[in-house]
Amino acid sequence: MMWPNRFNYNTVFLDKEVDLLFPPDIQAVWSHLPFRDGVFECVVFDPPHMWGTLPKFMDNKKNLHGGYYGVFKNEKDMVVSIIKASEEFKRVTNRLCFKWAETKKPLHRILTCFSGWRKIHEYKIRPGMGKRSWRQARGNSFWVTFEKI
């Protein structure tokens, strides 16, 4: 959970899974958001950063289902899903904040999924900088802010 206040009335938490430690306010998928056009001032998008076989350090990191949460089937599935999300986000907002961790794919390669968006800011978080958990301590992480073109 990236937010310190899980019950912030200004925020809507969306996820496709419901049996999570912190269940979402709304269950949905990125490619079909149940919101009217232009409803949000900003959307924060933190997709899974991995696909396929997990690295050894994640062996015991399981979700409530006993499976791994936040892993795409393969690289193609990841790219297609992020492109679909990017297109759907354009419908509901003019501004997008995107978080990416370079666990398997570098940021410059994933940014190609965001056509129709103009990058207005990029912030790099180096490994170990202000990290609070095992998954945050490996590789560079980035926050990128986009504006709809």
Image (tube, rainbow, N blue to C red):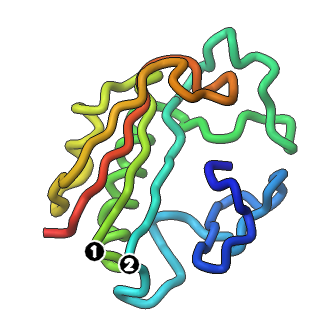
User: In terms of depth relative to the viewer, which is nearer, 118 or 91?
Assistant: 118
Q: Position of residue 124 (x, y in %)?
A: 34, 32
User: Is 142 located above or below residue 53 in the figure?
Assistant: below
Q: Tag 2, which secondary structure?
A: loop
Q: Position of residue 127 (x, y in %)?
A: 48, 18
The residue labelled by disc 2 is 41
Q: Position of residue 88 (x, y in %)?
A: 36, 70
Give residue 134's mark.
none
Q: Are marks 2 and 1 in contact (CB under 8 Å)?
A: yes
Question: Which residue does the image show at 27% across and 74% down from the upper left?
Answer: 94
Question: Which residue does the image show at 50% across and 49% down from the upper left?
Answer: 46
Q: Quadrant of the C terminus?
A: bottom left
Kindly give the residue lying farthest to the front in the view shown: 130
User: Is 33 located above or below residue 139 in the figure?
Assistant: below
Kindly give the residue lying farthest to the bottom in the view shown: 36
The residue labelled by disc 1 is 94
User: Is 34 located above or below residue 106 in the figure?
Assistant: below
Crowding around mark 1 (Cα neighbors within 10 Å: few <14, some 14 to 19, many 20+) is some
